[in-house]
Image (cartoon, rainbow, N blue to C red):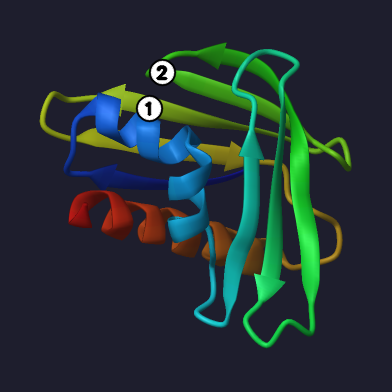
Amino acid sequence: MISVEVIINASIEKVWDFWITPKHIQNWNSAFDNWYTSYAENDLQEKGKFRYEMRSKDKDESFDFEGIYTKVEKFQLIEYKLSDNRIGSVHFEDFGNNVKLVEYFEPNKTDSESMQKQWCQDVIDNFKKYTERF
């Protein structure tokens, strides 16, 4: 398992909302400046599906990041299984004026683990910047 973490200076309610709401997901969910999330759907409940369409800004490449939720505990935990059967989880720890977010995920077999860790860290760093800005 790979893990990444960040501390966000915002309330748990705001962090949770910005993490799960499609209009917000589209604004922070990317690891690279030349990629973006062109579409997001999110049915946050056990057995609910999520799908994010990732696209390069030059529109030459795209892929879907999708899966189902296996466990949801509001303001605390989201567990999921991706379409390729890898698993992951996102943990939210409320400290009042800030929230520690930790994501654990099973790496794919194609890319190096260090590269995958950096990509995911970049995504949650973008989440932190976006959430703290609005």
Residue most extreme to the left: 97
Q: Residues within 10 Å of mark 1 (few under 14, many from 20)?
A: many
Residue 59 or residue 16, whichever sits in front: 59
Q: Residue 96 in the image: state x and y as whole percent.
A: 13, 24
Circle 2 SS class: loop
- In this picture, residue 99 sits left or right of residue 81: left
Q: Position of residue 7 (x, y in %)?
A: 26, 44
Task: Kindly tell me whether residue 55 is visible in this rendering.
Answer: yes
* Residue sitting at x 54%, y 68%: 31
Q: Left of 41 or right of it: where is 11?
A: left
Vertical comparison of 121 with 80: above or below? below
Disc 1 marks a residue whose amino acid type is Phe
Q: From the image, tell me which residue sits under label 1.
A: 92
Residue 100 placement: quadrant = top left
Residue shown at the point (20%, 57%) measured from the top left:
133
How packed mark 2 is, by other alpha carbons closer than 10 Å (few <14, some 14-19, many 20 or more), is: some
Q: Quadrant of residue 30?
A: bottom right
Report the number of discs: 2
Query: Which amino acid does the dot numbered 2 rest on?
Result: Gln
Residue holding disc 2: 76
Picture coordinates of residue 41 (x, y %)? 65, 39
Q: Residue at x 37, y 32 (%)?
A: 17
Labels 1 and 2 touching (C-beta < 8 A): yes
Q: 48 and 101: which one is in front?
A: 48
Q: How far is mark 1 from mark 2, CA to CA?
A: 5 Å
